[in-house]
Image: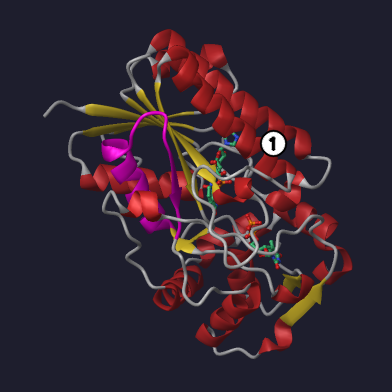
Amino acid sequence: MADRTYLVTGGCGFIGSCFIRMILDRDPQAQVINLDLLTYAGNPANVASIEESPRYRFARVDVRDLAGLESWVEQSDVIVHFAAESHVDRSTSEAAGAFIDTNVGGTFALLEAMRRYRPEARFLQIGTDEVYGDIEAPNEPDEDALLLPSSPYSASKAAADHVALSFERTHGLDVLVSRCTNNYGPYQYPEKMIPLFITNALENIPLPLYDGGTQIRDWLRVEDHCEAILLLLGSGESGEIYNIGANQRPERTNADITKMILECLGQSESGVEVREGLRPGHDQRYAVSTQKIRSLGWMPQRDITDGIEATVRWYADHRDWWTPLKSGAYRTFYEAHYGSGASDFKTS
Ligand code: NAD
Ligand code: TYD
């Protein structure tokens, strides 16, 4: 079998780095090019375990830079586009413009580079279930459902999905879109709820639970997401959209997940601090139908209780990974966003 070159954007982030580790491990023919701008969320430590591999190359490239993409795109067989601004709470601030620039403009530039320099490649747009908006129980939107994004983040991702599919329809490129539910696991930047709550609990500082914690997310372990991506790269159809999710039963609220984290650490709920109004437009529930990808043979392999326990253990064992991330620029964001509730934030 011939070598296959995977161009991965955002491979120093949470999900992209998991995908790179997985593809190098699973496919001995795989060559990986990781293009990442190394924003605050991009961390070379996430790929430290494979950086010496002769099948791995990294370049610091902005996906919005068409000229910078050319030489990389022309040598690729498969493009997996993870790079994005990904934190909803940043998108509800004056930083929203970066979401439109990177998530829409970056997706466009990458597709345009593929159209010009490597039109035979396959392109997977990594999307999110948040594009469907707030979903009333017990509904589970399928891939044809209306898009009703609530935040600038999800709106930018919805626009990026449309741009990607327009290149399939207009230019006949091989493009598909996946839309996954919330991921959790190792190497997730500690601004997202699960790693934030685990690391705050480990530091004995408050867990800022928004709006009573009644909201539902369909948490999926990051490795399950990456396995779904691998399957879609081989068996997904061009022009199609595939939802990916755990379909948790029972559905878990943020308060349930918080309780699970604290139980793993043997801590009481006294550290939970209910915060109101920190997330304008807060969606109550996300859910998706995953019948389409399940019909291709995928299903999640990891149970949420075991998954949370393993994740708590990973953060407890990798303080050296997250301690530097919770200082510097992130501390500034934390204090600005969480305000006086952040007064106990003592990592420096
Ligand atoms: P992340 O924030 O951990 O990583 C994003 C990466 O993109 C970082 O390495 C960053 O440096 C890089 N990046 C940002 N702007 C860039 C640019 N202009 N050029 C090149 N690189 C740039 O994000 P994540 O959680 O790993 O999410 C990856 C993708 O998966 C995103 O597209 C996100 O929308 C999608 N997604 C995430 C989740 C989730 O729960 N985290 C769920 C569904 C879909
Ligand atoms: P998050 O991890 O930011 O992912 P997303 O917004 O993409 O779903 O948030 C998950 C849920 O956790 C969401 O309902 C908001 C809530 N949340 C908190 O309660 N406190 C926090 O500090 C954060 C960051 C999120």
Residue 206 visible to the viewer = no
Q: How is the image coloured?
A: secondary structure
Residue located beneath label 1 in the image:
99
**Residue lying at 81% horizontally and 68% vertically, measured from the top left:** 342
Q: Which segment is the magenta one?
A: 222-245
Rendered location of residue 302, percent (x, y): 36, 68
Rendered location of residue 208, percent (x, y): 74, 71
Task: Please tell me how many numbered marks the rendered image carries.
Answer: 1
Residue 200 visible to the viewer = yes
**Amino acid at pointer 1:** Phe
Rendered location of residue 21, percent (x, y): 33, 47
* Left or right relative to 31: residue 289: right
Q: Is residue 309 positioned above or below 100 on the image?
A: below
Residue 226 magenta-highlighted: yes
**Residue lying at 70% horizontally and 50% vertically, measured from the top left:** 88
Quadrant of the frame with the C terminus: bottom right
Rendered location of residue 212, percent (x, y): 76, 76
Residue 29 vs residue 130, the one in the foreground? 130
